[in-house]
């Protein structure tokens, strides 16, 4: 089997992150806690503090009223920037921006935004234009885009258009929050062509890849090795997202029914509710083996986490996202199997099901998608060879022979 599914991903317009090309480090905590919402203390310092009034709001974008004293308008911007933002460094503003997002986004999403903005900051610094966010101009953005097209990514090749677009979307949202419409202004210019995602193959793991990963996981010592072997066996049999398996609870397992309750789905508390995912039969023995090793690891201690971690302080809780990324990187280095993240196992689950003849409706339901469009666009699609063979069978006709008279 070809290790790459012969499918393609059209532009992924609704995802607002570009972490695959960014830094995997966690966003800095040195500026917490700071609030970036309107009317809260300014992270710049006392001299720049001033709460917005109703008059200020009336002078906001879309109104021709002159901004009140203390508000810092951006050139060609009909409105105001946040108080004192012109004296705020890029990273200080990022910290305030991430704080302001906390009521609206999951912690993992905010973390990814932080990584993307740090990537943008490093590239702006390399260009010598890492200024206050209100001072970044359209030529600065153009220079940044050229750098993204030409500099190698951390994976060795050039940064793809999809990653450039995601980084640009995150940076645009941040600059807009700071009162800087530089990227929005560029979008309105007819001669400007900003990066857009293009169709690329969906990366999945074949049987040989999975076998190599499992063998290499056996070489990882201690509890991390046990967890690695469990993930390599379990994820292709369930299609769970990294967050969903990381926060799964022991009581969510229902092996007798061949399923697991996804108690922390993507979009929980907003547009998603807990739902079930399958546990395919070929992985159930691996799950039973893991549960025995889990009991030995806890050594009489109690934990509700399906994948617990005992910290030096004595606290027991779920693994962090950073720990799982580190484990993935270790597996990749040991095995030589290149894959972008644990989410690759989710696409592998979907593609193997489609290849085995499962209807896309069934695969979509198992992955808890709202429609089959999401499944087909981003996870699995009938392979070209299989599609051609199916068409051949559907349109097969008796061979016609012309005999000479």
Image (spheres, rainbow, N blue to C red):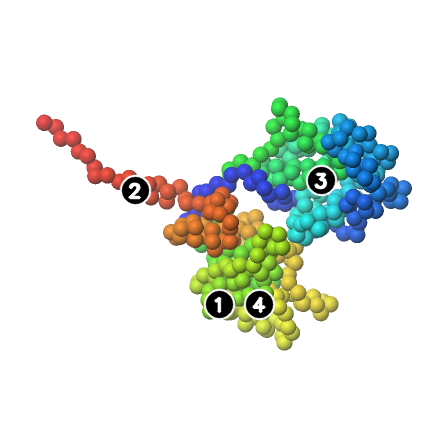
Q: Residue 255 — which label?
A: 1
Q: What is the residue that sits farthest to the bottom in this orientation?
A: 300
Which sits earlier in the primary sequence, circle 1 or circle 3? 3
With 325 as the anchor, is 64 left or right in this view? right
Residue 323: image x %, image y %?
A: 64, 57
The Cα atoms of the two marked residues, 1 and 3, are separated by 45 Å
The Cα atoms of the two marked residues, 4 and 2, are separated by 47 Å
Q: Residue 357 — which label?
A: none
Which sits earlier in the primary sequence, circle 4 or circle 2? 4
183 to 37, vertically: above or below: above
The Cα atoms of the two marked residues, 1 and 4, are separated by 11 Å
Residue 259: image x %, image y %?
A: 49, 63
* Viewer can see residue 271: yes
291 to 138, vertically: above or below: below
- Say few, some or many: other residues with alpha carbon within 10 Å of mark 4 (under 14 / 14 to 19 / 20 or more): some
* Viewer can see residue 135: no
Q: Quarter of the image holding residue 45?
A: top right
Which sits earlier in the primary sequence, circle 1 or circle 2? 1
Which sits earlier in the primary sequence, circle 1 or circle 4? 4
Q: Quarter of the image holding residue 391?
A: top left
Identified at 54% across, 70% down, the residue is 291
Residue 252: image x %, image y %?
A: 55, 65
Element type at mark 3? helix
The Cα atoms of the two marked residues, 4 and 3, are separated by 39 Å
Quarter of the rendering occupied by the C terminus:
top left
Identified at 44% across, 43% down, the residue is 6
Element type at mark 2? helix
To which residue does mark 2 refer? 394
To which residue does mark 4 refer? 250
Element type at mark 1? helix
Disc 2 and disc 3 in contact, CB within 8 angstroms: no
To which residue does mark 3 refer? 174
């Amino acid at each position: 089997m070809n290790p790459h599914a012969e499918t393609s991903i059209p532009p992924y317009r609704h995802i607002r992150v570009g972490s695959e090309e960014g830094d995997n480090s966690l966003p800095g905590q040195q500026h917490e806690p700071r609030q970036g919402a309107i009317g809260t203390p300014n992270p710049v310092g006392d001299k720049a503090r001033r709460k917005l009034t109703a008059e200020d709001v009336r002078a906001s974008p879309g109104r021709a009223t002159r901004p009140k004293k203390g508000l810092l308008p951006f050139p060609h911007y009909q409105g105001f920037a946040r108080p004192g933002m012109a004296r705020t460094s890029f990273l200080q503003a990022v910290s305030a921006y991430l704080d302001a997002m906390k009521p609206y986004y999951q912690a993992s999403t905010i973390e990814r935004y932080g990584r993307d903005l740090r990537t943008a900051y490093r590239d702006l610094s390399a260009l010598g234009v890492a200024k206050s966010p209100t001072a970044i101009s359209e030529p600065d953005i153009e220079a940044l885009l050229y750098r993204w097209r030409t500099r190698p990514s951390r994976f060795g090749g050039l940064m793809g258009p999809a990653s450039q677009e995601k980084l640009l979307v995150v940076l645009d949202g941040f600059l807009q929050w700071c009162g800087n419409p530089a990227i929005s202004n560029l979008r309105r210019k007819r001669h400007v062509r900003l990066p857009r995602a293009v169709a690329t193959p969906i990366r999945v793991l074949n049987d040989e890849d999975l076998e190599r990963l499992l063998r290499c996981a056996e070489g990882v010592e201690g509890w991390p090795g046990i967890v690695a072997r469990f993930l390599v066996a379990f994820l292709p049999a369930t299609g769970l997202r990294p967050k969903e398996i990381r926060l799964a609870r022991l009581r969510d397992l229902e092996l007798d029914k061949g399923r697991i309750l996804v108690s922390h789905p993507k979009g929980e508390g907003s547009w998603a509710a807990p739902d079930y995912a399958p546990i395919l039969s070929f992985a159930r023995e691996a799950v039973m083996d893991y549960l025995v090793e889990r009991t030995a690891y806890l050594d009489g201690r109690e934990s509700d986490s399906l994948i617990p971690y005992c910290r030096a302080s004595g606290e027991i809780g779920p693994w962090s996202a950073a720990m799982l990324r580190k484990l993935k990187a270790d597996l990749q280095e040991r095995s030589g199997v290149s894959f972008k993240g644990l989410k690759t196992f989710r696409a592998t689950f979907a593609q193997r099901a489609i290849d085995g003849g499962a209807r896309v409706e069934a695969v979509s339901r198992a992955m808890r998608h709202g429609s089959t469009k999401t499944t087909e666009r981003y996870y699995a699609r009938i392979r070209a060879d299989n599609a051609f063979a199916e068409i051949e069978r559907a349109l097969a006709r008796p061979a016609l022979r012309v005999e000479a008279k």
